[in-house]
Image (cartoon, rainbow, N blue to C red):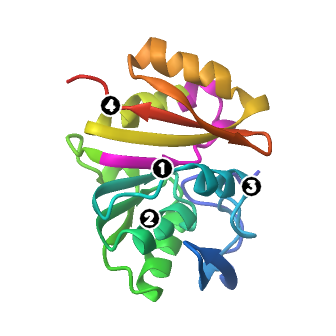
Amino acid sequence: MDHYFTASPASPDERRPLDVTLAGRAVTVEVAPGIFSPGGVDKGTAVLFDEVPDPPPSGRFLDLGCGWGPIALTLGLLSEHADVLGVDVNERSVDLLARNAQALGLDHVRAVTPDAVPSDAAYDLIWSNPPIRIGKAALHDLLREWLPRLAPGGSAYLVVQRNLGSDSLQRWIEAELGMPCGRQGSAKGFRVLRVDAGAR
């Protein structure tokens, strides 16, 4: 079975244009099968956009699990002086985000696989619709690796379905990572969690 969290999807790489609205702008992006939400902006990401405060005009921003790029592209459109990085294990997703950023003239938005990110890289802001369906252990490993990369004063916003464990994930982040974690908002069956950088 082809999963969006597979490094090399087995489904045909059939690219197609898609009209979407990002950061209040009508744009055309490229999507393909074998990635997360190829039909458009998924419900969780839409809730994330509605609930988070606008990003600052500059800084180092991370989209963890970028897919074709709705989050990274939105960050790039809202903050033209920021350095925006989209990360995904799915190589097709990384290529799509890179192409979409180029097509929209967002030279400050890049896309890479996780192994291309230096271990000491730190981020002022993380927005993510994390891949809950990879399983709890793998999700915990993912967050254990990336959330501590928040720079001092930085925050991460994660959107998680309530019935897929958002409340238990909030408790785990606080207990396991020692990072303050609260609810930023809640809508349409999703919670948006805010994680603040712990003391270094």
Say few, some or many: other residues with alpha carbon within 10 Å of mark 3 (under 14 / 14 to 19 / 20 or more): some
2 and 3 marks in contact (CB < 8 Å):
no
The residue that appears at 67% across and 78% down in the rendered structure is: 20
> What is the distance, in whole Å, between disc 2 and disc 3 at their CAs?
18 Å
Q: What residue type is labelled 3?
A: Lys
Whether 21 is drawn above or below 1: the answer is below
> What is the distance, in whole Å, between disc 4 and disc 1 at their CAs?
14 Å
The magenta span reads 124-139
2 and 4 marks in contact (CB < 8 Å):
no
Whether 3 is drawn above or below 168: the answer is below
Disc 2 target residue: 75
Disc 1 target residue: 127
Towards the viewer: 104 or 97? 104
Mark seen at residue 197? 4
> What is the distance, in whole Å, between disc 1 and disc 2 at their CAs?
9 Å
Q: Position of residue 147 (x, y in %)?
A: 39, 34
> What is the distance, in whole Å, between disc 2 and disc 4 at their CAs?
20 Å
In-image side of 41 versus 189 (left or right): left
Residue 87 shown in magenta:
no
Q: Earlier in the sequence, mark 2 or mark 3?
A: 3
1 and 2 marks in contact (CB < 8 Å):
yes
Q: Is mark 2 on a helix, strand or loop?
A: helix
Say few, some or many: other residues with alpha carbon within 10 Å of mark 2 (under 14 / 14 to 19 / 20 or more): many
Towards the viewer: 174 or 111? 174
Say which quarter of the image contains residue 139.
top right
In-image side of 167 versus 79 (left or right): right
